[in-house]
Every structure is written in structure tokens, then in C-alpha cells.
Image: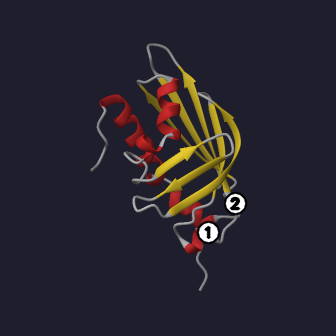
């Protein structure tokens, strides 16, 4: 059986958040924040690795970091280990760009690319996948409460 997907090989998402670049950086790199908006994943990002664990400690991702420039830019591989089919595909790449704007607002751009050879991964993250994560991050930073329980 052949599955065909039309998911986009380069996906770009942007959101404006009423928070400092430093607060956004902390929220995307520290597990005590990510578990509140990123599908309960405890994600820890450092200069060499981005490691994601589920609520019960299972390893979801262990990705190489390509760029680590706090609080402006984080670029890392993306290879989901939580799904056997996705784990068989080549790693893709995620870029987080954090740009201060006026009046205490920061623009966050997430680019998920190198998905040409990873169509199942592309389909799994396209649309609501990344939008739910970014909406949850924005809600958490602006209100102190998670988007969902």
C-alpha cells in the first residue's frame, strides 16, 4: 500500500507574543515550561542537544543542535522517536527565530524544513501541530495559564 501526502516541505509559522525575547527563549528551552504547552513534553535545549521526554520519562527526541544563540535563534534537527514510522524517516530541521518588536512584543517565527524526504513527519506537524504548540506558548507567557489541561 502506498500513502501519498501533499504536506509542505518547508513550513513557516509566526506569532507575536507580549513577552521579552529572554522569556520566550526560556519557555522553549526549559522543561518546566515546555511540559505546559508542548504536548506535555519535557524539552531541554542546550548548545549541543535538544532532548524531549514524555510525562512518563520516555525519550521522544534526542536531536543535534546546529545553532544556539540565546535569546535570538535556536536551530536543531527533528527526528521523532515516539512513532516508529516517523523515526524511520531522515531528520528534518526546526529553526526558532526570536525578534524583539515595539511595546514589549516579540515576534516568534518557527520554520520546519528539510521535510522533502520525510513526508510522514511533514504531515504530522503541518497545520494544527505547530499552531497548537505556538498558541499554547503564547497563552502561557501572556496569561501564566496553559491553553489546555
Helix or strand or loop: what does disc 2 sit on? loop
Gap in angstroms between the C-alphas marked 2 and 1: 15 Å
Residue 128 or residue 26, whichever sits in front: 26
Q: Which residue lies furthest to the top in this view?
A: 103
Q: Is residue 7 visible?
A: no
Q: Name the residue under label 2.
A: 116
Location of residue 82 in the rendering, given as x and y in whole percent from the top left corner:
52, 67
| Residue at left offset 57%, top offset 66% | 81
Relative height, residue 121 to residue 105 (above, below): below
Relative height, residue 22 to residue 81 (above, below): above
Q: Does residue 146 appear to the left or right of 102 in the view shown?
A: left
Residue 137 or residue 127, whichever sits in front: 137
Helix or strand or loop: what does disc 1 sit on? helix
Location of residue 126 in the rendering, given as x and y in whole percent from the top left corner:
52, 55
Location of residue 3 in the rendering, given as x and y in whole percent from the top left corner:
58, 77
First in sequence: mark 2 vs mark 1: 1
Location of residue 11 in the rendering, given as x and y in whole percent from the top left corner:
59, 48
Q: Name the residue under label 1.
A: 87
Q: Does residue 128 appear to the left or right of 48 in the view shown?
A: left
Relative height, residue 132 to residue 67 (above, below): below
Query: How crowded is the residue under tag 2: few (<14 C-alpha within 10 Å), some, or many (20+)?
Result: some
Amino acid at each position: 500500500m502506498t500513502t501519498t501526502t501533499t504536506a509542505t516541505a518547508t513550513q513557516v509559522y509566526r506569532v507575536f507574543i507580549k513577552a521579552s525575547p529572554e522569556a520566550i527563549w526560556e519557555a522553549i528551552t526549559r522543561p518546566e515550561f515546555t511540559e505546559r504547552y508542548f504536548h506535555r513534553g519535557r524539552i531541554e535545549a542546550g548548545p549541543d542537544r535538544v532532548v524531549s521526554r514524555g510525562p512518563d520519562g520516555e525519550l521522544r527526541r534526542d536531536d543535534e543542535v546546529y545553532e544556539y544563540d540565546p535569546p535570538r535563534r535556536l536551530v536543531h534537527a527533528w527526528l521523532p522517536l515516539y512513532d516508529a514510522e516517523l523515526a524511520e524517516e531522515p531528520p528534518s530541521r526546526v529553526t526558532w527565530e526570536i525578534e524583539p518588536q515595539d511595546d514589549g512584543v516579540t515576534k516568534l517565527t518557527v520554520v520546519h524544513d528539510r521535510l522533502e524526504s520525510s513526508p510522514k513527519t511533514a504531515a504530522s506537524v503541518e497545520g494544527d501541530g505547530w499552531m497548537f504548540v505556538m498558541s499554547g506558548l503564547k497563552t502561557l507567557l501572556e496569561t501564566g495559564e496553559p491553553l489546555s489541561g
